[in-house]
Image (cartoon, grey):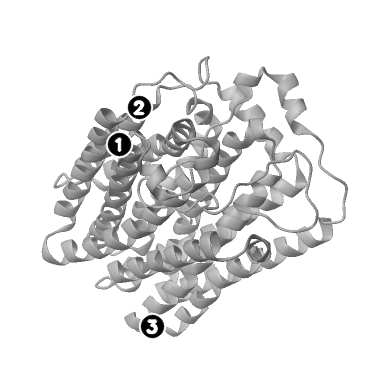
Amino acid sequence: MRSYTDLFGTREFTPLFLSASLQTAASTLGGLALGTLVYRATDSPLLSAISMFGPQLAQVVGATTLLSAADRLPPRATTAGIAAGFAVGTAAMATPGLPLGAIFALIFLLGLIQSLGGGVRWGLLNEILSKEGYLLGRSAFNVINGLMQITGYAAGGVLLAVLSPRTTLLTASALYLAAAATARFGLTRRAPRSSGRPSVAQTWRTNALLWSSPERRTTYLLLWIPNGLVVGCESLYVSYAPDHAGVLFACAAFGMFVGDVTAGRLLPPALRRRLGIPFLLLLATPYLLFALHPEAPVAAACAALASVGFAASLVQQERLMTLTPPDLSGHALGLHSAGMLTMQGVSATLAGGIAQLTSPGPAMTVMAAASLSVTLTLAATRRRRAPSTPQPDVSSRARRRKPAQESRGDGEGGAGGVLPRPREPPGGRVTVACTRPPSGTCRGGRRPSS
């Protein structure tokens, strides 16, 4: 399988692709509309940021309790059910007079549902495609994710100007419902990938095993913290420029798209592996200018340039897979996504609190400076650790704890409210090893699709 034509010639790929695309469009519209609705009602940058990125805060609960369920539920029913749940929840948030507390309760509930979405979807994609076609399939999802974010935020800005936030939320609900119908009637009924009931204990054991490697810990932190702090900057777009927030989000999505295509399809692998840290530095640096309160056109250009740096996720996630044995790779991706989305939610809350005390521009600068500091610190830690001895074979340890089918991990977590950004490398196949590679780097949302 070497071309996109081959992908779309695979029967179930098209309905899964369309369902994911509709959910991405719905989440961009719904997130922007909800953030605007809350900001108009409260005039609070903090509450606006939490409303847009609140579902990510629930990811930590899902990562520690629900992650093992992604391989143990029927994929078609679960995919359709998650989209339908978001349709109902988004429509409920559009109810006139709904108390703010009820809105945030719905946001948290949807975040719990969301924590299973990516694991179910990417596990199903792995079943639908051959091993040789999986990475090409993920690259197609990455491309449409960026394009749908650009279109969704631009359309959301227009709908908010012409209609109202509640009408825009209902539009997002209709898109979620269409995604549920596409999955239900387009996909084939399949048995769960693993037998047994979902286990909180197994989730905890595998998380601890993955976290036991110092090199994987550093890679996880590079995936979670610099990315999350910059998403905190993005969470302030609505309060920074209420009339131009859709433009800022669309420009940021365009920059992310350019970075993904460049890193995944244009850069040679050897060069790409060396650009993980430079991409993270690019991700934060343009936001330092927001201390000067640039006008909307300059702010949009800064957002686009910074978002090219989200390509660092490709590099760091590739490295994560190189450091992870095959029987833990799915769970490792699920932990990466859940941790990343949780950090994004925490950072959005922190950025909103700083903006509440100062103003959105200086708050963005503080978050960007923190991201740069963390990146440089973790890069220095990785360089000091590079000459050390290879990692132990954790795969055999995992098999001694649990039978192979019980050790099987869950796929990457999804995003519902605002799109997140975990991604597989679009080009080339990743070789997975149980020992640490030489000192070169490999791979690691912003927001993933839901």
Marking on residue 96? none
Say which amino acid is labelled 1: Ala
Please say if the residues under marks 2 and 3 sit with CB atoms less than 8 Å apart.
no
Tell me the residue at 75%/42% (across/down): 213
Neighbour tally class for label 1: few under 14, some 14-19, many 20 plus, Cα within 10 Å = many
Q: Is residue 349 left or right of residue 215?
A: left
Q: Secondary structure at mark 2?
A: helix
Residue 116, given in percent of the width and then of the height, sits at 44, 34
The alpha-carbon separation of the residues under discs 2 and 3 comes to: 45 Å
Q: Which quarter of the rendering shows the C terminus?
A: top left
Q: Is residue 388 left or right of residue 347?
A: right
Say which amino acid is labelled 2: Arg
Which residue matches tag 2?
Answer: 76
Which residue matches tag 3?
Answer: 298
Nearest to viewer (mark 2 / mark 1): 2
- Comes first in the chain, label 1 or label 3: 1
Tell me the residue at 38%/58% (across/down): 146
Tell me the residue at 27%/48% (across/down): 100
Nearer-the-camera pick, 84 or 390: 390
Which residue matches tag 1?
Answer: 83
- Comes first in the chain, label 2 or label 3: 2
Q: From what the image shows, is residue 282 above or below residue 144?
A: below
Tell me the residue at 44%/77% (across/down): 302
Is any atom of residue 27 visible in this view?
A: yes
Say which amino acid is labelled 3: Val
